């Protein structure tokens, strides 16, 4: 289980870093487009299309990493009133609901990626930018999140069975606000 967790975290970190590189490239191209448009009267072609595709990587590439750190938003109205078992069961329940939602999103993303590949779908901008990579990245990011959710559900149920706190909170270095 530890090997799976470490492999999953390394893959999620890699996808997160790839998204960070994509975001930086998107910012550089966006800056060049603004400067080119305002001062040189020559915009950078394909900026919009590149930025749209990169945003898919930024958002869906970070989902599994954030989940591995238990960094997603949690409403704790009833959560803090329960004991360790109750909190673990609530975590398992919310992770199961997230698994269902993102499972449907992943399935739909896979279908869209396959269809996009089959028809060679491309954007209708100044540069024909292929849409398959962005659709495949959406499916990859959600699939990675699904694996992380399965690991988390198993961990939550184990905590509920043992009745201890275990690892319900994110590591201390990732807590932004106390």
Image (spheres, rainbow, N blue to C red):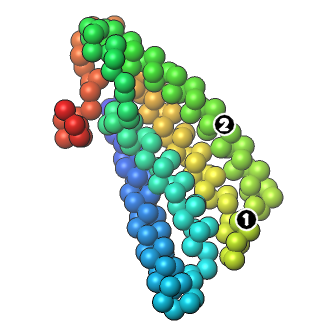
Residue 82: percent from left, percent from top: 29, 8
What separation in Å lies between label 2 and label 1 (alpha carbons)? 21 Å
Q: Quadrant of residue 151?
A: top left
Q: Dot 2 corresponds to which residue?
A: 107
The secondary structure type at the circle numbered 1 is loop
**Residue 122: which disc?**
1
The secondary structure type at the circle numbered 2 is helix
| Residue 168 in the figure: left or right of residue 134 | left
Residue depicted at x 67% and y 58%: 132
| Residue 171 in the figure: left or right of residue 71 | left
Mark 2 nearby-residue class (10 Å; few <14, some 14–19, many ≥20): some
Asked whether residue 72 is in view, the answer is: yes
Residue depicted at x 77% and y 62%: 120
Residue depicted at x 40% and y 67%: 24
Which residue is at the front of the view, 8 or 17?
17
Residue 64: percent from left, percent from top: 43, 40
Q: Earlier in the sequence, mark 2 or mark 1?
A: 2
Which residue is at the front of the view, 125 or 132?
125
């Amino acid at each position: 289980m530890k090997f799976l967790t470490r492999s999953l975290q390394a893959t999620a970190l890699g996808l997160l870093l790839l998204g960070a590189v994509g975001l930086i490239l998107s910012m550089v191209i966006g800056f060049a487009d603004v400067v080119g448009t305002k001062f040189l009267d020559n915009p950078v072609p394909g900026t919009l299309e590149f930025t749209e595709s990169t945003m898919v990587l930024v958002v869906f590439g970070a989902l599994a990493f954030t989940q591995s750190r238990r960094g997603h938003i949690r409403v704790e109205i009833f959560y803090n009133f329960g004991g360790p078992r109750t909190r673990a069961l609530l975590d398992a329940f919310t992770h199961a609901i997230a698994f269902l939602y993102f499972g449907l999103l992943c399935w739909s993303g896979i279908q869209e990626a396959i269809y996009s590949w089959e028809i060679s779908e491309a954007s209708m901008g100044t540069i024909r930018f292929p849409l398959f990579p962005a659709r495949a990245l959406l499916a990859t990011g959600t699939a990675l999140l699904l694996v992380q959710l399965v690991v988390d559900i198993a961990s939550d149920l184990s905590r509920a069975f043992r009745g201890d706190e275990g690892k319900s909170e994110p590591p201390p270095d990732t807590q932004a606000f106390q």
